[in-house]
Image (tube, rainbow, N blue to C red):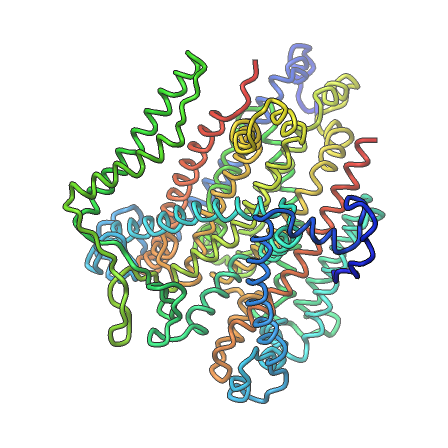
């Protein structure tokens, strides 16, 4: 190389090439240049193709009339509304199934994880078989399976299966009783107040314990508040409350809440699939705490419940929280499979939108932005929680 | 697990009476709560399992000639699978040429099995992969050696699922390796590029990448060029898997003690020499089990190509179900392919667990 460049014979120049700083700068300029050129090439191609196909760019289409109906909406929506509102509805549907799914998968997964460690032979085997079978079959297939099971193999509303009194399963979905009445707002307000009061009490109890060493029976106080405040709200609200039980009228159920087959299949699939993974997370977390911790805490005279709460769980949670976070993220991302069984989540709505408008790039950008926002929010929250429970090293 | 005659252990002290019955009692009825759990679960199993067995086998119809006959049996209709198994397993590949598709599948399985055997962990494993993948391409496409040409829109079924997964991991691995090295690089620009790529891909679902590749890749290319649907899906899978592989490999790189890097530096090795001879051999060895995990999830994730209309195993099952003459047997079809997916994923995951144990003992000494 050096022979072709007359200047390179000067010692200073040589030194520069041997200097790692200069060399890395040259490499970086080269790599960024190559990547930049590649991106520019793709973008210019895209712009050319778009103009050749008469597709406009930009987000103006969000303000135009959507013209398609959405099966399930949490806010009022009509086909005359805008694309922007339709996408909003889709996002809300994604969030609805994700939030309910995360809560249910955590509960079921914890139960299964503990069951896998049970000394009861039957319980641990059944939990183990569940985890192995569910983990090794694709989620999409499970969704198809549940959807087919509900829509094809369940009886019609007239012969609906009554799982519990008031809960009906038919090929039109699941009908659940709902609570109605004027006192509902009062109860909700009472509940919110109770939670705020419990948080304040917990703060006060912790400071008191630090100051005096006295332990406040927080669990009993919390239970009392949780009963007293909503009950007060119920009385203040007039004391009226009724259960709206679904009844068969004609060909379908009236009253109560009806979960569509799509929503039921998606939620069931997500919860069943994710719980198999969270079960493993919980199991490995509990197993990571050594036996000696149980024994030492027992030697201090703590009861079994307090050992679990004060000694084992804080240590297990440290191991559990990071992989649990990625399971939550997975569940949220997996909810996009809704498009395959026709639940109107954000991917499905945006897909319809980009088929109508042809504005593929904007559509894909919206999907990505939505998921990135949700993912980042979940991981920020979980990182904050993780930091709270992490080992404080001195 | 039948309890042995209980008379046997009468004289012995309970702690040492290790016959089946005492063991069973200790495991199932040691406390009131435990007994309650056992009874509840046993009742549940007694309600569910016999009903399932009856539906799956006893009342099932294995040889019905048509759907009406099958429906009247009251059990599963396996005759439907018997009728449609070629469609489900090989998709729309030309019927008389399906042996080629099958052979390609067998070759892919053989390569995967070879890669699992430690004796094959030599540099020439790459050569085996290259030869096998070329062979698969020749078999599937044809057009040479007297094989008729089959365009890839007709490929389908299990071989296509295997192709998407194995080609996906084979191309994603080198890319992911470079990304991992880039993310650990001391050059800020390179590091930033890699971080943005990895986090962007990992933050979005595979489905959105598949949509993107199916609608946006054609726009990216200059006019006159086009890539077919299958290749677009394969590109999306490779881009997706690479980000996950990068994060896993980065974990391995971080686990290598700093002394190894410094030692390599002090030997006067250059960056690529260091990586090739000292760091990567150790780092990759650590991350083999999680890489196998990535392969399992990739294998399952290939089913998502259904949403852009590629005829993989899942889509083939859906097509079989859609036959108007055989309506209403979706559950049977999905169970059939679920068993296929399960056999693959479960055996790979068992292998991965065994490997993890063996690699660990190697380290502890």
Residue A92 in picture, x, y percent from top left: 32, 49
Report the side of B143 relative to B329 (left or right): right
A356 w.r.t. B328: above or below: above
Residue A261 in picture, x, y percent from top left: 38, 64
Report the side of A312 relative to B125 (left or right): left
- Residue shown at the point (45%, 14%) measured from the top left: A213
- In depth, the one of B131 and B334 nearer the eye is B334
- In depth, the one of B98 and A86 nearer the eye is A86
- In depth, the one of B116 and B75 nearer the eye is B75
Residue A177 in picture, x, y percent from top left: 30, 59
B277 w.r.t. A53: above or below: above
Residue B308 in picture, x, y percent from top left: 47, 61
B38 w.r.t. B282: above or below: below
Outermost residue, front side: B11
Task: Please identify the quarter of the rendering in which residue A122 is found.
Answer: bottom right
Whether residue B124 can be seen here: no
- Residue shown at the point (24%, 63%) measured from the top left: A255
- Check the picture and name the quadrant holding the C terminus of chain B: top right
- Residue shown at the point (74%, 56%) measured from the top left: B21
- Check the picture and name the quadrant holding the N terminus of chain B: bottom right
């Amino acid at each position: 190389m050096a022979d072709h460049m007359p200047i390179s014979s000067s010692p200073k120049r040589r030194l520069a090439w041997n200097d790692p700083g200069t060399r890395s700068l040259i490499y970086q300029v080269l790599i960024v240049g190559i990547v930049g050129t590649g991106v520019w090439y793709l973008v210019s191609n895209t712009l050319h193709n778009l103009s050749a196909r008469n597709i406009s760019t930009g987000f103006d289409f969000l303000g135009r009339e959507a013209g398609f109906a959405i099966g399930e909406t949490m806010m009022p929506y009509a086909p005359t509304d805008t694309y922007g509102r339709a996408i909003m509805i889709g996002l809300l549907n994604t969030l609805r199934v994700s939030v309910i799914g995360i809560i249910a998968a955590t509960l079921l997964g914890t139960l299964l994880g503990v069951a896998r460690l049970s000394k009861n032979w039957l319980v641990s085997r059944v939990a183990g078989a569940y985890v192995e079978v569910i983990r090794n079959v694709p989620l999409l297939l499970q969704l198809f399976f549940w959807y087919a099971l509900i829509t094809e193999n369940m009886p019609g509303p007239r012969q609906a299966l009554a799982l519990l009194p008031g809960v009906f399963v038919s090929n039109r979905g699941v009908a659940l009783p709902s609570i109605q009445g004027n006192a509902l707002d009062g109860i909700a307000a009472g509940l919110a107040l109770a939670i705020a009061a419990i948080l304040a009490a917990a703060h006060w109890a912790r400071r008191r314990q630090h100051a005096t060493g006295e332990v406040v029976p927080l669990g009993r106080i919390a239970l009392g508040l949780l009963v007293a405040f909503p009950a007060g709200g119920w009385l203040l609200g007039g004391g009226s409350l009724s259960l709206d039980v679904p009844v068969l009228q004609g060909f379908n159920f009236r009253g109560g809440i009806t979960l569509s087959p799509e929503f039921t299949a998606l939620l069931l699939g997500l919860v069943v699939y994710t719980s198999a993974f969270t079960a493993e997370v919980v199991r490995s977390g509990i197993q990571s705490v050594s036996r000696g911790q149980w024994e030492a805490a027992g030697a201090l005279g703590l009861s079994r419940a307090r050992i679990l709460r004060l000694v084992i769980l804080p240590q297990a949670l440290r191991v559990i929280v990071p992989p649990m976070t990625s399971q939550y993220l997975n569940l949220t991302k997996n909810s996009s499979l809704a498009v395959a069984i026709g639940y109107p989540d954000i991917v499905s709505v945006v897909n319809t939108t980009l088929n109508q408008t042809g504005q593929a790039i904007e559509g894909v950008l919206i999907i990505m932005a939505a998921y990135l926002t949700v993912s980042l929010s979940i991981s920020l929250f979980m990182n904050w929680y993780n930091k709270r429970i992490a080992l404080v090293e001195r | 697990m039948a309890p042995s005659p209980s008379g046997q252990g009468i004289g012995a002290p309970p702690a040492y009476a290790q016959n089946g019955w005492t063991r069973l009692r200790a495991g199932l009825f040691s406390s009131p709560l435990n007994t309650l759990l056992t009874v509840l679960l046993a009742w549940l199993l007694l309600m569910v399992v016999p009903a399932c067995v009856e539906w799956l086998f006893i009342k099932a119809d294995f040889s019905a000639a048509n759907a009406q006959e099958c429906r009247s049996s009251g059990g599963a209709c396996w005759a439907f699978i018997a009728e449609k198994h070629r469609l489900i397993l090989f998709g729309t590949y030309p019927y008389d040429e399906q042996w080629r598709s099958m052979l390609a599948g067998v070759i892919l399985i053989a390569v995967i099995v070879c890669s699992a055997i430690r004796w094959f962990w030599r540099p020439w494993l790459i050569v085996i992969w290259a030869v096998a993948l070329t062979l698969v391409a020749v078999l599937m496409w044809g057009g040479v050696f007297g094989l008729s040409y089959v365009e890839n829109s007709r490929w389908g079924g299990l071989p296509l699922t295997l192709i998407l997964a194995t080609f996906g991991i084979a191309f994603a691995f080198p890319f992911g390796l470079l990304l991992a090295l880039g993310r650990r690089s001391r050059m800020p620009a390179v590091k930033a590029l890699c971080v943005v790529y990895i986090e962007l891909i990992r933050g979005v679902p595979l489905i959105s990448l598949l949509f993107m590749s199916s609608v946006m890749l054609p726009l990216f290319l200059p006019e006159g060029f086009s890539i077919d649907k299958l290749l677009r899906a394969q590109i999306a899978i490779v881009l997706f898997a690479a980000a996950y592989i990068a994060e896993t490999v980065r974990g391995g790189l971080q686990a290598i003690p700093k002394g190894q890097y410094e030692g390599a530096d002090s030997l006067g090795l250059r960056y690529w020499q260091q990586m090739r001879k000292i760091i990567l051999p150790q780092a990759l060895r650590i991350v083999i089990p999680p890489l196998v995990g990535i392969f399992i999830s990739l294998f399952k994730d290939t089913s998502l190509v259904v949403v852009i209309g590629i005829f993989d195993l899942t889509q083939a099952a859906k097509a079989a179900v859609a036959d108007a003459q055989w309506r209403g047997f979706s559950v049977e079809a999905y169970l059939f392919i679920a068993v296929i997916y399960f056999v693959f994923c479960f055996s790979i995951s068992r292998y991965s667990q065994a490997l993890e144990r063996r690699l660990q003992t190697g380290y502890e000494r």
